[in-house]
Amino acid sequence: MITYSAAVVMPVFISILAIGIVLYLIIYYNVFKGSRCTSSVTLKGKTAVVTGSNTGIGKSTALDLAKRGARVILACRDKQKAEAAAYDIRRESGNNEVLFMQLDLGSLKSVRSFAETLLKTEPRLDLLINNAGMMGSGRTEDGFGMAFGVNHLGHFLLTCLLLERLKECSPSRVVNVSALLHRLGSVDFALLGTYKDLVPGQSAWHNFKAYCHSKLCNVLFTRELANRLEGTGVTTYSLHPGVIHTEFSRNLNPWLRLFQVPIAKLFFLDTEAGAQTTLYCALQEGIEALSGRYFSSCALQEAGAMGRDDALARKLWEVSERLSGLS
């Protein structure tokens, strides 16, 4: 039997470990880390609304906008967390024009109340960043599946109610945070009519599929919104932010979280890196002609086939108008 002394084994082990670390860093910084928004645009005198901005990439997005001098409104459901986030952003950015306004996207009444208050109190709106998103079971206040109601319908109504102010302040932008998983989504209008949701159940698999469907809705909404806004000076973009390590997984099954968290810490983007494509779509000059399109890693990408279906986008808009009480 051949035996090896520690003096022989340890250097080999250390070499293999070092190679593994180098490979991990290469993969992380070149594949997972993503690109960065290099825009030097300043936003003094501009107003931005960022939904779901008390944590995660929404908070990182709001912080960057505040550092550029914007008046930033954190549109969030949790008052305590949002006020703490606003305090953090004011302190780190040196910008005191960062404030919280109550918005629960799972309540159409709350969306209408938020829009009414904003239009009464804020003379400008230059950037609307529909960032909030969730995956999980349950129903909204109006009886819709949570992912469809929060990720799509709440943002749809919010955007429609604020469009006139965005037009008045043009050039302005609407940025919708979607996900690569929109490629696995579909829109079944018959199912929506029956269940007020795009899935028929509440299992973990149904929740995952509902999330994918809602992210497809974000892409389709952006496409149809761009068609309707042509010539107004308001442009709109959807995007995949990357695979982010945030509190997003808080709604997952505890066993799934146990599996997901260590992988997320090793391989997923941090929130600052995850905000870069959102910032690119909000700030980058010269992309106005690409209104309605889909971005990832701070670059134009092709959306999935269903995400490029204009007829489907138009029908989703019409159905969403009815479901949100706009028609």
Image (spheres, helix red, strand yellow):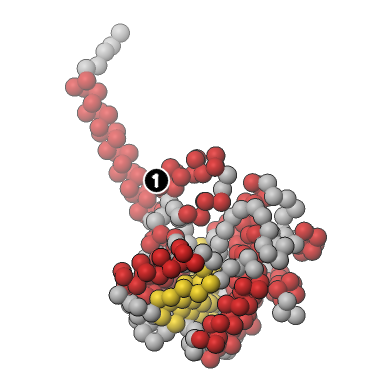
State the SS at label 1. Answer: helix
Q: Quadrant of the N terminus?
A: top left
Extreme residue in the left direction: 7
Extreme residue in the front direction: 80
Residue 239 at x, y percent in the picture: 52, 66
**Is residue 210 or residue 93 the one in the foreground?**
93
Residue 23 at x, y percent in the picture: 33, 44
**Is residue 53 or residue 220 the one in the foreground?**
53
- How dense is the environment of label 1, judged by Cα within 10 Å: few (below 14), some, or many (20 and up)? few
Extreme residue in the bottom direction: 168
Residue 286 at x, y percent in the picture: 44, 81
- Quarter of the image for residue 83 reads bottom left
Q: Residue at x 75, y 80 (%)?
A: 327
Residue type for callout 1: Leu
Q: Residue at x 43, y 42 (%)?
A: 262
Q: Residue at x 70, y 73 (%)?
A: 324
Q: Is residue 14 above or below residue 196?
A: above
Left or right relative to 21: residue 277: right
Q: Is residue 206 visible?
A: yes
Give the number of callouts.
Answer: 1
Residue 253 at x, y percent in the picture: 58, 44
Q: Residue at x 45, y 55 (%)?
A: 246
Q: Is residue 22 above or below residue 134?
A: above
For label 1, the residue is 266
Q: Is residue 296 visible?
A: no
